[in-house]
């Protein structure tokens, strides 16, 4: 991939030219698509369909919201495609926000991502693995946390070994995950519900319809595709390859979600899904008995592992970018040439994730707590990335854009409005838990205010 040429007089590019050129473009298109599918198609598809069913009043509406979710995600992917192809950079969202709004807001994003969003996602996924593996084989009173910690340590170690080993692991896990989902889908389509099952399902009824809440859960399930932005500078096929990877990835994910939801509907029906706590487990139990429950436990664990590995891989890139731009975090900004990975950033990310697992152990409601405080912060910065499309078009109109978002400005406007709505919904839905994430963000703001003093002191020590 050719190196991005800065516009004349653009100080931001001149400062970051070295940073952009450091990661090597060794990833293939299949690696990028695998990362997108691996992050998005996670454990959520085994839980959220029941919540969506409970908030829709017909099969048509149920399937429609999944299609709309795919369309909205595709719109977001088109916005990201313009940003990633115009400004290919390992910093991803951090780079776009910094470029559009300045270093201070960029710092807040990187801080929130490192301390709340990305590490919270890793902890959530690790908890899911721990919960399901505990059902198969318990390690005692703290089994779930022990399994979760082993997941974080193992996957972080794999990514420290090197980018090739990490992406090879990702492709293997993604293939196993998608194969398992196709198995569930096939089981649903081939299984013919008996009269007794049908009558049991018919007794349940959907009491209300809330399209807004249904969309919240659908888009939660689609969340994560933007993580591909963090490997845009490492993609071998260049800028246009990144746009293709985003679009193909979203299309594949939407088709997978439609197939598995059609399978759920065939076996359980809409009302049966609405009352289910684990739709995939119920489907497999109906089709294969108790053995099906064990199988789904293994599948969900693999699914969460897939997403966790991809999240660890991409998350460390933002921490690396933070270390490159702010001397107080310079330990994070070191790229290991031999492994072609930001090893220090991976280690710090792993330690924070382990600390969040400890928080989960302390509160005994760690999974719910982490969801509460990550969502509002995530959607706030997602909204800013959408606005960045407009800002950067205005600030750098002559910049070469290999891919331009179609139907501008309507397309990014829809993306921004959707993100704003989900920010509002997450604040209302999470309530008190959201204050935790906001509190951590405010701690980052205090650190930001102290940065000039800290950096001045560090510079003085270096001269001394």
Image (spheres, rainbow, N blue to C red):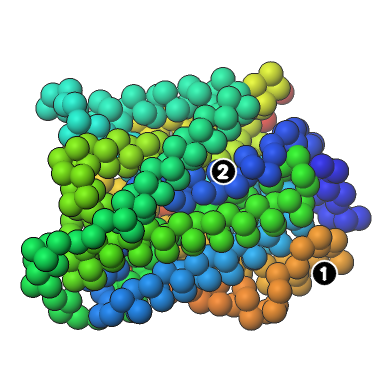
Residue at coordinates 70% horizontally, 70% vertically from top-left? 405
Residue 38 appears left or right of 131: right
Q: Is residue 464 above or below residue 84?
A: above
Q: Nearer the viewer, residue 367 or 225?
A: 225
Residue that badge 1 annotates:
397
239, 362: nearer the viewer: 239
Q: In this orientation, which residue lies closer to the viewer: 263 or 335?
A: 263
Image point (63%, 27%), residue name? 164
Estimate the x, y position of residue 197 in percent, counting from the top left: 12, 62
- x and y percent of residue 116 in the render? 41, 46
Q: Is residue 444 visible?
A: no
Q: Are marks 1 and 2 in contact (CB under 8 Å)?
A: no
Q: Residue at x 82, y 42 (%)?
A: 1
Mark 2 residue element: helix
In the figure, 285 relative to 54: above or below? above
Q: Can residue 367 be seen by looking at this rendering?
A: yes
Mark 2 neighbour class, 10 Å CA radius: few under 14, some 14 to 19, many 20 or more: many
Considering only vertical position in the picture, is 204 above or below 316? below
Q: Give the CA separation, mark 1 to mark 2.
A: 33 Å
Residue 34 image label: 2
Comparing labels 1 and 2, the label whose residue is closer to the camera: 2
SS category of the residue bearing label 1: loop
Which of marks 2 and 1 precedes in the sequence?
Answer: 2
Q: Which mark is residue 157?
A: none
Picture coordinates of residue 15, whole percent (x, y): 79, 43
Number of disc labels? 2
């Amino acid at each position: 991939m050719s190196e991005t040429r800065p516009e004349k007089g653009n100080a931001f590019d001149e400062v970051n030219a070295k940073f952009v050129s450091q990661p090597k473009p060794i990833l293939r298109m299949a690696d990028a698509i695998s990362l997108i599918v691996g992050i998005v198609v996670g454990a959520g598809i085994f839980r959220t369909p029941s919540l969506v069913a409970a908030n829709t009043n017909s099969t048509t509406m149920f399937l429609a919201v999944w299609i709309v979710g795919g369309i909205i995600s595709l719109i977001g992917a088109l916005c990201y495609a313009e940003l990633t192809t115009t400004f290919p950079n390992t910093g991803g969202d951090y780079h776009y926000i910094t470029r559009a709004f300045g270093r201070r807001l960029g710092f807040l994003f990187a801080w929130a991502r490192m301390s709340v969003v990305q590490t919270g996602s890793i902890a959530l996924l690790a908890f899911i693995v721990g919960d399901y593996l505990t059902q198969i084989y318990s390690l005692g009173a703290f089994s779930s946390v022990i399994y979760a910690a082993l997941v974080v340590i193992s996957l972080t170690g794999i990514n420290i070994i090197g980018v090739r080993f990490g992406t090879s692991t990702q492709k293997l896990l993604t293939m196993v995950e998608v194969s398992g989902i196709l198995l569930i889908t096939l089981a649903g389509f081939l299984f013919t519900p008996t009269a007794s099952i049908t009558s049991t399902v018919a007794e349940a009824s959907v009491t209300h319809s809330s399209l807004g809440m249904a969309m919240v859960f659908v888009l939660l399930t689609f969340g994560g595709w933007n993580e591909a932005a963090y490997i845009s500078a490492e993609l071998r096929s260049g800028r246009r390859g990144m746009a293709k990877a985003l679009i193909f990835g979203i299309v594949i994910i939407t088709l997978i979600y439609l197939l598995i939801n059609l399978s759920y509907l065939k076996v359980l029906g809409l009302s049966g899904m609405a009352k289910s706590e684990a739709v995939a487990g119920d489907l497999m139990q109906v089709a294969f008995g108790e053995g099906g429950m064990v199988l789904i436990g293994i599948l969900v664990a693999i699914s969460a592992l897939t997403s966790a590995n991809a999240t660890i891989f991409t998350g460390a890139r933002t921490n690396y970018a933070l270390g490159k731009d702010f001397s107080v975090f310079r330990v994070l900004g070191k790229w290991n040439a031999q492994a072609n990975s930001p090893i220090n950033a991976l280690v710090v990310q792993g330690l924070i994730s382990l600390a969040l697992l400890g928080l989960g152990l302390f509160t005994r409601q760690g999974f719910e707590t982490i969801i509460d405080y990550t969502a509002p912060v995530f959607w706030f910065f997602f909204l800013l990335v959408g606005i960045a499309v407009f800002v950067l078009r205005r600030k750098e109109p002559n910049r070469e854009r290999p891919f331009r978002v179609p139907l501008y400005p309507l397309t990014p406007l829809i993306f921004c409005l959707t993100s704003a709505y989900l920010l509002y919904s997450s604040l209302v839905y999470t309530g008190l838990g959201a204050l935790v994430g906001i509190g951590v963000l405010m701690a980052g703001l205090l650190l930001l205010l102290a940065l000039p003093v800290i950096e001045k002191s560090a510079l003085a020590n270096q001269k001394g």
